[in-house]
Image: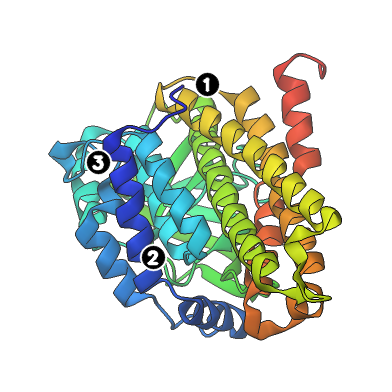
Amino acid sequence: MRLVPTEEQSELRAVLRSLFVKECTPDLVRKWKAAGSESSGTVFPDSLWRALTEMGVFGLALEEELGGAGATLNELGIFYSEAGRALCPSIVYSTLAFGIALDRLAGQEMREQYLPRLAAGELRAGVALWDAADAHNVSPTLTATRADGGWALSGLLPFVENAELAELLLVTATATVFAEPNRVLGLLVEPGGQGWTSTWQPTIAGEHQYRVELDELFVPDERVLAGNAGLALVEVRWVADVVTALQCVEMSGGGAAVLERTVDYVRTREQFGRPIGIFQAVQHIVADIHIALEASRLSADSAVWWLARGEQAGRNVAIAKMHASEAYKWATLNAHQVHGGMGYVRETDLHLWSERAKVSEIRGGTADVAARWLEEEIGLVH
């Protein structure tokens, strides 16, 4: 794993940071949060989306033949880090996760059909491939029965992010066919229509979560990823690990932004005629935040690096999730303490990172859940 970025990676980070400063302002974050909190489902970050499309972010880790930039997950991790600093709207992450999943799980024909559209920013999408409370549980909760020219999907998806904003949703289902062994199918679902019911689920950070119930929703054969062979759950697990690892990078980026805001504050805020940053108690808190976030960043980068090599890196992902979940949340709590009363005034925007930290901690599993993944990886659970 490279600890020092290349010149190209440093330039990529600088350009992304400049883009987010201009296009992903706290005002946009507030509007996105408010839309998710009010279940309007109508607010979309159009200007940011166009800027990311022009920069090629949606195709960053896709092959050039598919309209992508031919980069790796390591470069995509740089994007997630800068996006985390700016509290990027989750529809961007959902669409990137869809691209990662389809690129890994679909055949060439389907990849050629959808991935160029995604790289061009013409497709908003999402995934529902694992348990929202345990990303290592990739067992399907939906069932698929044979119908004329396709499959009828039924079942419940308790938490689906951006279900009402996505044009396509990638799901898995257990196919049940008489006299044939059960197999796992990947299917592209169009939200809405007959058999689709979604219910808005409020969250503290306005994360556009929905409970989705399917009742014999029809999916044609041309939108099925795997036919007779079915999908290998180990491949679905790899996708879940990649998305989780990138989420950890995003969390470390968010924590870094909180630390920077805190350092700036203690340099200028005065008590007894002196900046509070000269007091040892404050210095200890800031130093502890820095140490925790560096551990989070390094473990997340390590997980992404192994996954970028095509490896199964469950142990690395578990460690990264344990570090990131605790470090991000802990950094925001301590930042509020150092800011004092100002830390609890909404106009300071610090609460936006605190809310995102709490939601990110839970998404895919808390640190305790990740610790169980690690136990399984090292053979302590049978």
Q: Which of 87 and 105 is in front in this view?
A: 87
User: Which mark is drawn over residue 312?
Assistant: 1
* Residue at the spot of label 3: 111
In the picture, measured across the screen, residue 227 lies left or right of residue 372, that is: left
What count of labels does the image hold? 3
Q: Find residue 90 and report its horizontal and vertical position in percent.
A: 49, 63
Q: Find residue 361 and report its horizontal and vertical position in percent.
A: 70, 52
Q: Which of marks 1 and 2 is in front?
A: 2
Judged from the image, the secondary structure of the residue bearing numbered disc 3 is helix
What's the residue type where badge 1 is placed? Answer: Gln
Which residue occupies 48% across, 36% down? Answer: 239
What's the residue type where badge 2 is placed? Answer: Phe
Does residue 54 lie above or below 180 as drawn? Answer: below
Seen as rendered, the residue at the extreme top is: 379
Does residue 327 lie above or below 337 as drawn? Answer: above
What's the residue type where badge 3 is placed? Answer: Arg
Q: Can residue 226 be seen in this view?
A: no
N-terminal-most mark, 2 or 3: 2
Q: Residues within 10 Å of mark 2 (few under 14, many from 20)?
A: some
